[in-house]
Image (cartoon, rainbow, N blue to C red):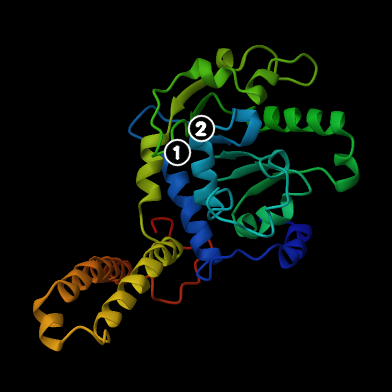
Amino acid sequence: MLSSLHTTMAAAARRPRHQTFSAAVSCHRLRQVQAIVNRSNKPKSDGILCILGIDSRYNEGCRELANYLFFDLYNMTNIDCDTADLPDEVLDDVILLIKSQSVHLYCNPVNYKYLLAYVAHWRNLHMHCLTEKEYQDEEAAEEFKIASFVNMVRDCSRIRVPYSSQGHVQKFDMFIVEKWPIIQAFALEGIGGGGFFTMTHELFDASEELWQAYTRLDPTSLETLITEVKHPFISSYNCYTLSMTLPRVSIASRNSGVILPLCKTLVRPYFRVLCTVLHAAAQKGYWRNREDTGEGNQND
């Protein structure tokens, strides 16, 4: 459950840009990831670890998972005026450990207000975040991050990592993961966990199972898909209507010539895409007014 502080801050959090975003969709996506921890065909794991930015050497698989859970907040193709001025090292300063019944999230007080809208509804959320005053001490902030990471994984012995993205498939190598800066910091004396990370933790790849979760339709992914095809569809439709008003083209040539068949060819695929996604959404019941915020049907 959220503390009263988190509940108060949620009201001041940055509003997600997707019109279809809701607590139900956010919790639904989280449960899709948590289900992988429970239903994996591979040896059972204790959680899925997602590290962003320089701490994972900008791993694309971790960024892809973050974009799924944070609704494309880290999508480089989206120009978000709210985050455009933030340095990458500040916005990417995030560590997630997703367990079957809880989530640990490390962030800083700057990107906290951007993340809060997406995580405020998650059940059993454990936040690791300094105050703005504490964060001004760079050395103390770095030590806090390492200590937070050590505490996150303390009770975990088998951890899965989103190693590859769908657009850049790589063979999983736990020794590459061992070289990630935050993983190496685990071995530091005093604030670290003592010893190398892979000596006390088994690492597995979670990429393929996560890809299956990413492809499942929800209201926001439907909105994204429709938005992606909307502009090409409008352009194709304008081409079609323009062909019907060209003064130098006779009606006979419009119907029997090249322009009209060409425009029909351009428009038809977008109609098919729209019909497909709308039919799939209707079958899944996403047009209902859903009140599930994570405490309802766990099989959703």
Earlier-in-chain disc, 2 versus 1: 1
Residue bearing mark 1: 37
Place of residue 128 in the rendered image (x, y in percent of width and height, measured from the top left):
73, 42
- Provide the secondary structure element on which disc 2 rests: loop
Left or right, 82 with respect to 121, comes to right
Q: Dot 1: what SS?
A: helix
- CA–CA distance in space, label 2 to label 1: 7 Å
Local crowd size for mark 2, using a 10 Å CA cut-off: few (<14), some (14–19), many (≥20): some
Give the labeled residue for mark 2: 46
Task: In this rendered view, identify the residue nearer to me: 14 or 246.
Answer: 246
Q: Quadrant location of the N terminus?
A: bottom right
Q: Nearer the viewer, residue 215 or 228?
A: 228
Q: Residue 181, position in %: x, y?
A: 66, 23
Residue 203 sits above or below residue 122 on the image: above
> What amino acid type should be assigned to the residue bearing mark 2?
Asp
The image quadrant that residue 11 belongs to is bottom right
139 left or right of 31 in image: right
Looking at the image, can residue 251 be seen?
yes
Please give left or right for residue 273 compared with residue 88 in the image.
left
| Residue drawn 79% across the image and 30% down it | 142
Q: Is residue 258 above or below residue 143?
A: below
Q: Could you tell me if the residues under marks 2 and 1 are in contact, i.e. CB atoms within 8 Å?
A: yes
x, y percent for residue 45: 46, 30
